[in-house]
């Protein structure tokens, strides 16, 4: 349970940091690149011998790492063209893919009526919690961006589950995430020659500082999620991976929206408040699944 709590907290802090960057008009990309280097170093410091992992683990780690930064660009593009509300819903509702993958891939995972109810409530809560009628408008010509986001983010989370099940031992999480973030960093560095102005901005103290904060939180978000999947024990009972993904995603959405209210003074509409309530109910339902 403690791993799941810190996974939700770390992922939510990413939202807070990005919100601060936006408010202070700090360009996000240099901070993103630095953050991946910091996360890779965190993993290296905490890593244990590679013998804890099965041969071939570098391949999925590298793939996930590159996909991380690729979808950073897609999220940015979708937000600009399709709108932040639609992009957020597309990204968060992609949780149905790792949940489905876990159910069909893991022989110890299964779909029960209670679990189905929890998944349904989780998906509904995500939509309602971030819904804004004024911003929720989509040009049919731009629908492909949220769709790419929906499928892409789901594929990434499914790959995380696959890697955890196939390659990671109890002590291999840190090393796996270190290589993952190293490839994210290298993929970001490749972009720099095409945008020379980014090189100087990488060394600006403000970007380094925010990159440090973001990197620690980013590392924690994936490390604790993998640890939760490796140590699936909530309230003394072994918990299915699909439930871990459901509770993690629902918790992130609920906590992010609440922090938006209390930290950034954002206004919640009744439909958003209903989404938060349903999210809490979904988490309770998951705990009985």
Image: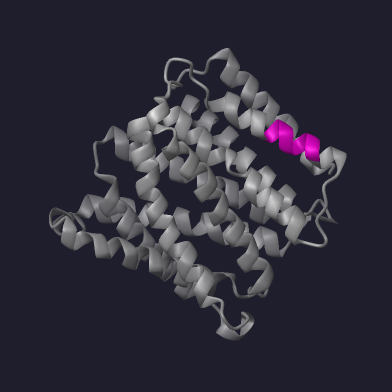
Residue 89 position in % (x across, y down): 52, 33
Would residue 200 appear left or right of 111 to someone viewing this image? left
Q: Kindly identify the residue that appears in the image at 68 percent across and 35 percent down.
A: 122
The quadrant in which residue 239 appears is bottom right
Q: Kindly identify the residue that appears in the image at 60 percent across and 75 percent down.
A: 172
Q: Is residue 114 above or below residue 64?
A: above
Q: Residue 156 colored magenta? A: no
Q: Is residue 153 above or below residue 125?
A: below
Report the predominant secondary structure element of the magenta stretch. Answer: helix
Query: Which quadrant would the C terminus be assigned to in this image?
Result: top right
Let me know if residue 165 appears in the view. yes
- Depth check, front residue: 213 or 186: 186
Q: Kindly identify the residue that appears in the image at 56 percent across and 83 percent down.
A: 50
- Depth check, front residue: 168 or 20: 168
Would residue 105 appear left or right of 23 to someone viewing this image? right
- Depth check, front residue: 97 or 182: 97
Q: How many marks?
A: 0
Would residue 134 appear left or right of 93 to someone viewing this image? left
Let me know if residue 49 appears in the view. no
Q: Residue 117 colored magenta? A: yes
Residue 76 position in % (x across, y down): 35, 41
Provide the residue span drawn in magenta. Answer: 116-122
Residue 146 position in % (x across, y down): 46, 37
């Amino acid at each position: 349970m403690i791993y799941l709590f810190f996974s939700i907290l770390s992922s939510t802090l990413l939202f807070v940091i990005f919100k601060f960057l936006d408010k202070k008009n700090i360009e996000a990309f240099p901070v993103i690149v630095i953050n991946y280097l910091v996360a890779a170093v965190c993993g290296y410091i905490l890593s244990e011998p590679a013998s804890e992992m099965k041969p071939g683990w570098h391949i999925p780690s590298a793939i996930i790492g590159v996909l991380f930064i690729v979808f950073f660009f897609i999220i940015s593009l979708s937000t600009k063209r399709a709108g932040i509300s639609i992009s957020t819903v597309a990204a968060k509702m992609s949780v149905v893919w790792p949940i489905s993958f876990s159910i069909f891939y893991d022989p110890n995972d299964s779909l029960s009526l209670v679990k189905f109810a929890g998944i349904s409530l989780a998906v509904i809560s995500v939509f309602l919690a971030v819904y804004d009628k004024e911003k929720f408008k989509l040009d049919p010509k731009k629908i492909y961006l949220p769709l790419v986001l929906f499928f892409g983010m789901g594929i990434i989370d499914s790959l995380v589950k696959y890697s955890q099940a196939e390659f990671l031992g109890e002590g291999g999480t840190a090393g796996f995430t270190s290589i993952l973030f190293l490839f994210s960093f290298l993929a970001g560095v490749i972009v720099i020659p095409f945008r020379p102005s980014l090189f100087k901005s990488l060394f600006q103290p403000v970007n380094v500082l925010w990159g440090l904060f973001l990197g620690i939180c980013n590392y924690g978000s994936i490390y604790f999620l993998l640890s939760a999947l490796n140590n699936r024990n909530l309230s003394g009972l072994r918990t299915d991976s699909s439930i871990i993904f459901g509770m993690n995603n629902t918790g992130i959405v609920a906590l992010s929206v609440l922090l938006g209210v209390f930290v950034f003074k954002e206004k919640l509409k009744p439909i958003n408040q209903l989404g938060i309530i349903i999210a809490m109910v979904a988490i309770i339902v998951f705990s009985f699944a």
